[in-house]
């Protein structure tokens, strides 16, 4: 019995010295339905690991803020456009799924022109703009938070 008491006491003391989980403090103004966080992620890699990482980042942001409290756009250009082409994308199913959850995907028209690709080759629901990098600049100037994972 004494051994059990000592074990419980030691285990309790060890657990007190363990890592403490800290919650992220939200900055003011707090995000909400009428004031969502607006976050854009840059995708410029054709590596499936990088693509999946960015897609997980987007999901984790939605989980943290709540789907109604965050707007997320993934802007792809250069090699990252591979993720957005229906026949080439190793993550097409994930993109189609995330489109249903309100994540916006924006591709670069300049990259498409340079690589002889057409908008009809994009996964349905993926938008395209003239220049992906200009889209990032304009959104950033409009208050979007820019993340380059």
Image (cartoon, rainbow, N blue to C red):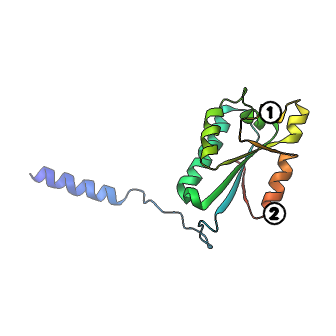
Judging depth in this view, the residue of 79 and 6 nearest the camera is 79
- Find numbered disc 1 in the image and state the secondary structure of the residue it sits on: helix
Q: Nearer the viewer, mark 2 or mark 1?
A: 1
The image quarter in which residue 48 lies: top right
Q: Residue at x 58, y 48 (%)?
A: 59
Q: Residue furthest top?
A: 87
The vertical placement of 92 against 13, above or below, is above
Q: Residue 3 placed where, x, y %?
A: 13, 50
Percent from the top left, x then y, of residue 117?
Answer: 85, 31
Of mark 2 and mark 1, the one earlier in the sequence is 1
Q: Which residue is mark 1?
A: 120
Look at the picture and state if 140 lies above or below 100.
below
Q: Label 2, on which residue?
A: 141
- Residue at the (79%, 35%) spot, across then down: 79
Q: Secondary structure at mark 2?
A: helix
Residue 43 at x, y percent in the picture = 74, 42
**Compared to 57, does 51 lie above or below?**
above
Q: Residue at x 89, y 40 (%)?
A: 110
In front: 75, or 35?
A: 35
Q: Nearer the viewer, residue 4 or 120?
A: 120
Mark 2–mark 1 Cα distance, whole angstroms, equals: 30 Å
Left/right placement of residue 88 relative to residue 115 reads: left
Query: Along the horizontal axis of the image, is 15 left or right of 69?
Result: left
Q: Residue at x 76, y 37 (%)?
A: 80
């Amino acid at each position: 019995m004494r051994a059990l008491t000592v074990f419980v006491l030691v285990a309790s003391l060890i657990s007190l010295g363990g890592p403490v989980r800290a919650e992220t403090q939200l900055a003011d103004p707090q995000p909400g339905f009428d004031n969502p966080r607006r976050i854009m992620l840059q995708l410029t890699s054709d590596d499936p690991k990088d693509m999946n990482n960015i897609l997980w980042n987007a999901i984790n942001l939605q989980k943290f803020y709540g789907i109604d409290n965050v707007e997320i756009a993934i802007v792809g250009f250069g090699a990252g456009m591979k993720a957005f082409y229906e026949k080439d994308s190793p993550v097409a199913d994930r993109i189609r799924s995330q489109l249903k959850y309100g994540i916006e995907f924006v591709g670069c028209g300049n990259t498409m022109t340079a690589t002889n690709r057409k908008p009809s080759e994009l996964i349905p629901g993926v938008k395209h703009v003239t220049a992906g990098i200009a889209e990032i600049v304009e959104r950033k100037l409009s208050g979007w938070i820019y993340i380059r994972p």
